[in-house]
Image: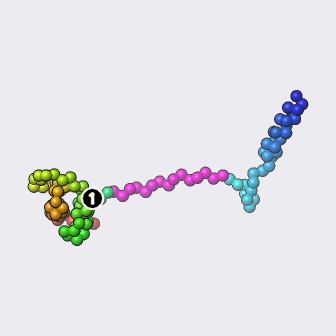
Amino acid sequence: MKKVFALVLVLCSPAAFAQDKPPPTVGGKPLVQIKPKEAAPKEPKARPQSIAVRMQACLEIDDETKERLDCFDAIFPPKPKARVPAPKAVTDCTFFKEEDARLKCFNGFADKLPKPAN
């Protein structure tokens, strides 16, 4: 029994000594564990541009070029059909299979848009 008591005393004494020491200091000030900062609030997302503004931006690209058609196709992805009636809305331009016809259709609608007030 004395051996068990001596063993417990030996094992617990370093913990008791460690508690008696003051915390480590740097420049006379105790070290403090700092928690990581919370993530800063994200800035509000910019409001997406309207379709009209994006279409008018496509008009700044040279006319009759693949780049201008790609710009329009990014707004309205093509969905070709075999027979296409006369377009009544800009989304109807996506049904033209031929690139030239699709570009002329988009240009017609984009030219009619009123200029945005900045």
Task: Please tell me which residue lies in front, 98 or 69.
Answer: 98
Q: Residue at x 23, y 61 (%)?
A: 72
Q: Which residue is at 74% across, 56% downward?
A: 25
Residue drawn at x 87%, y 35% as measured from the top left: 6
Is the residue 77 above or below the residue 63 in the image? above
Which residues are the magenta region?
33-47
Instruction: Examine the rendering and report whether any part of residue 109 can be seen.
Output: no
Residue 69 visible, this orientation: yes
**Residue indicated by mark 1:** 74
Q: Position of residue 60 (x, y in %)?
A: 24, 69
Q: From the image, which quarter does the C terminus lie in?
A: bottom left
Report the side of 19 relative to 95 (left or right).
right
The picture quadrant where one finds residue 106 is: bottom left
Q: Return the residue nearer the eye: 63 or 13.
A: 63
Q: Nearer the viewer, residue 66 or 30?
A: 66
Tell me the crowding category of disc 1: few under 14, some 14 to 19, or many 20 or more residues within 10 angstroms, Cα based.
Answer: few
Residue 73 shown in magenta: no
